[in-house]
Amino acid sequence: MKLFRAQDRTTGPTVHEIAADWLLREEEGRLSSVDISRREAWLAADPSHRQALADVRLALVTASEGAADPELMAMRTHALAARPERAWPLSQSAAAVAAAILVSAGAWWILSAVAPSLQGPPAGAQMQPGDPNAVLYRTAVGERAAVTLPDGSVATLDTDSEIKVAYTGNERGVHLLRGQALFEVAKHKPTPFQVYAGRERVTAVGTTFNVRLDGAGENSKVSVALLEGVVTVSPAAAVDRTAPHQSVTMAPGELLEAKAAAPLVVVAADTERVTSWRSGVLTFNDTPLAQAVAEMNRYTTRPIVLADPKLASLRISGVFKTGDPEHFAETVSEAFPVTVSLEADGSLELEPGR
């Protein structure tokens, strides 16, 4: 975890304070077209500015897990109330806005708390062998991370996920190699934003959508959930005569599932539930226990094991914190005649109670 202490000083604002100010102004809907141009100029002025924006975005996601904490809520409310209308230069009150979001007890700023593998300039990037223009970003089991891409788009990676960023003069290309990621696409760019996952290509312009890749090869499944805007899903290959579809345009609130040699399935979906992982929680609604357990296990190295296949069909509903299999197992044991035992390898075994 990389931490920065808030210091008393008489010098100008830090890049992280400026980044926090930009994000808060965007959150409040107070960015004019002139402001957006100034922000883009600030981002283009120095690579450290984009990194600072990514740090603050990540801190916002992390802080959201404790958003209900009364002390943090009071700090943020006070800072917003004291926030001046004039953004430049930042006053002490404006600095407090950054602190209200990023600070924890003891006045520490959390700039990267959930994805140490993505720290550093550029954050966690690894050059792809044989492709000098491609960069890899990955998270480990239980980690999440927000990455600001070269055009200002933001990709938030879920647990055990990996993307390859390969922008060219013809496209803003991102390849989801495994796992899940949510993309907030920068608008008004000359080249299309395209995400490749399995056999599918998702094309978007200034929109927000979630892409998940399960399995590999012929057994892979691609899921796309659209939060806002419009995306088109089409075969990844320029010419793919084996693809069961050519292209499908999605509307907000829809979930698309694509499997090899099968027609696309597009259904209405609760996109907030689908993307609840961004806040560190999973939401289940009358979900088979086997499916819920498999989802919980994606976020931990201490998996839950169903000792009896008969337990798989039990249905469970609720909101559970990712990376907390113990609480999930306890809830199951309280709701059903199921006992929990801790195994020597750290796994949690669920078996029918007596």
Image (cartoon, rainbow, N blue to C red):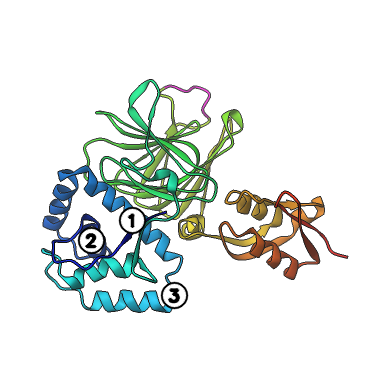
Label 1: which secondary element: helix
How far apart marks 1 and 2 lie (CA) works out to 12 Å
Residue that sits furthest to the right in the current view: 354
Of 277 and 7, nearer the camera is 7
Nearer to us of marks 1 and 2 is: 2
- Which dot marks residue 57? 1
Q: Is residue 242 magenta?
A: yes
Asked if the residue at tag 1 contacts the one at tag 3, i.e. Cβ–Cβ closer than 8 Å, the answer is no
Disc 3: which residue: 69
- Amino acid type at image mark 1: Arg
Give residue 173's quadrant in the image: top left
- Which quadrant would the C terminus be assigned to in this image? bottom right
Query: How far separated are the C-alphas under marks 3 and 1?
Result: 19 Å
Q: Is residue 269 left or right of residue 50?
A: right
Q: Residue 233: image x %, image y %?
A: 43, 38
Residue at image x 72%, y 48%? 345
Disc with the residue nearer the chain's start (3 vs 1) = 1
In the rendered image of this protein, does residue 244 appear above or below residue 54? above
At horizontal 23% and vertical 57% (from top left) the residue drawn is: 19
What is the span of residues highlighted in magenta in the rendered image?
Answer: 239-243
Is residue 247 visible in the rendered image? The answer is no
Task: Please name the amino acid that badge 2 sits on.
Answer: Glu
Question: Are the residues tagged 3 and 2 within 8 Å (C-beta)?
Answer: no
Residue 154: percent from left, percent from top: 33, 48
Question: Main SS of the magenta segment?
Answer: loop
- Which residue position holds label 2? 17
- 1 or 2: tag closer to the N-terminus: 2
Q: Position of residue 219 (x, y in %)?
A: 61, 32
Disc 3 marks which amino acid? Asp
* Mark earlier in primary sequence (3, 2): 2
User: Does residue 259 show up magenta in the picture?
Assistant: no
Residue 72, compared with residue 250, is above or below; it is below
